[in-house]
Image (cartoon, rainbow, N blue to C red):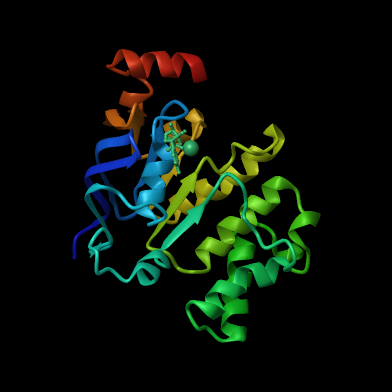
Amino acid sequence: MSDVIVEVSGLHKAFGPLEVLKGIDLQVERGQVVCIIGPSGSGKSTLLRCVNLLEEPQKGKIVVNGNEITDEDVDIDGARRKIGMVFQGFNLFAHLTVLDNLTVAQRKVLKRGKEEAQRIARENLEKVGLSEKETSLPGQLSGGQQQRVAIARALSMNPDVMLFDEPTSALDPELVGDVLAVMRQLAEEGMTMLVVTHEMQFAREVADSVLFMDGGVVVEQGPPSQVIGDPQHDRTKSFLNRVL
Ligand code: ADP
Ligand code: MG
C-alpha cells in the first residue's frame, strides 16, 4: 500500500467565472503534517473542501488512502467518513451534551453500539483534556473547549486523515494555545494532518512540509525552515512580512 494518504493532482475549481484553484498538486504522506498558508481568498478553504467532497472540482484528481474520491462512482459517504474535518466555527450540536456530540455519528454512520461509542468518545475526550465536561452542553464551554470537543468528535470516527481549516482563528488569543497543544500532540502520535493556519510558530515547529498558496496556485512548498525561514518568492516574503 502506498504511504501517500492524500494525493491531489491538477486540481481546478471555479465558481462560475471565478477560477479559485488553478491546478493544485499536493501530497500528504502517512503520519505527516502539511500546513497550508496564504492570504485570505487564495483558495485554501476551497482546497480542503474539495478534499472532503464538500465541493466538486472541475478538473483534477484526489486520492485519499488509495480511494479516488474524484471518481464519479465513488461512495461519497464511505469516503467522507474516513476524513476528519475541523472548521473555524465548531459546528457542534448545541442541544446535545458533549458526550452525545461525540457518539451520534459513530452510532448513525459507523453503526457502533452505545457502549462502544461512549468508550471511544471518552478516550478521545481524555485525549483533548475534557473528560470532566462530558455532560456539559456546548454553550457552557469556552470557544477553545468547544474546538477541542470538535477535534475529539472527528477523532472518534477513526479518520485516515484530519483536515483543519483555521481551527484557532475564531478563538480569543488566550484560548489558542490549548487547541494548538492538542494538535501538536496528535501530530506526535502520528496522525496524518492537513492544516490551514495562520499560526506560523505552529507551522514552523510541527509541519513536515509547508505550502504557500496565493491566487489559486501553490507558489512555494518545502520544509518550514525553507518556506517560512528562507522564502524564495516575493509573494511568500511579503505575506510573511504581514503575518510574522
Ligand atoms: P481562503 O480560504 O484562502 O481565504 P477560499 O477558498 O475561502 O479562500 O475562497 C477563495 C475564493 O473563492 C474567494 O474569492 C471566495 O470569495 C470564493 N468562493 C469561495 N467559496 C465560494 C462559493 N461557494 N461561491 C462563490 N465563490 C466562492
Ligand atoms: Mg479560508
Question: In the figure, 175 relative to 29: above or below?
Answer: above
Q: Which quadrant of the structure image shows residue 134?
A: bottom right
Q: Position of residue 122 (x, y in %)?
A: 63, 71
Which residue in the rendered view is the most extreme toward the front? 16
Question: In the figure, 223 relative to 28: above or below?
Answer: above
Question: In the figure, 52 relative to 123: above or below?
Answer: above
Left/right placement of residue 182 relative to residue 15 reads right
Tell me what residue is drawn at x 30 percent, y 49 percent.
Answer: 57
Q: Nearer the viewer, residue 20 or 157?
A: 20
Tell me what residue is drawn at x 61 percent, y 47 percent.
Answer: 89
Q: Quadrant of ligand 1?
A: top left
Q: Nearer the viewer, residue 54 or 195?
A: 54
- Res 103 seen here: yes
Tell me what residue is drawn at x 54 percent, y 79 percent.
Answer: 108
The quadrant of the picture occupied by the N terminus is: bottom left
How many marks the image carries: the answer is 0
Q: Position of residue 43 (x, y in %)?
A: 39, 35
Q: Position of residue 36 (x, y in %)?
A: 39, 36
Left/right placement of residue 180 relative to residue 137 reads left
- Res 244 seen here: no
Left/right placement of residue 192 relative to residue 130 reads left
Q: Nearer the viewer, residue 105 or 99?
A: 105
Tell me what residue is drawn at x 52 percent, y 48 percent.
Answer: 183
Left/right placement of residue 125 relative to residue 110 reads right
Q: Position of residue 163 (x, y in %)?
A: 44, 51
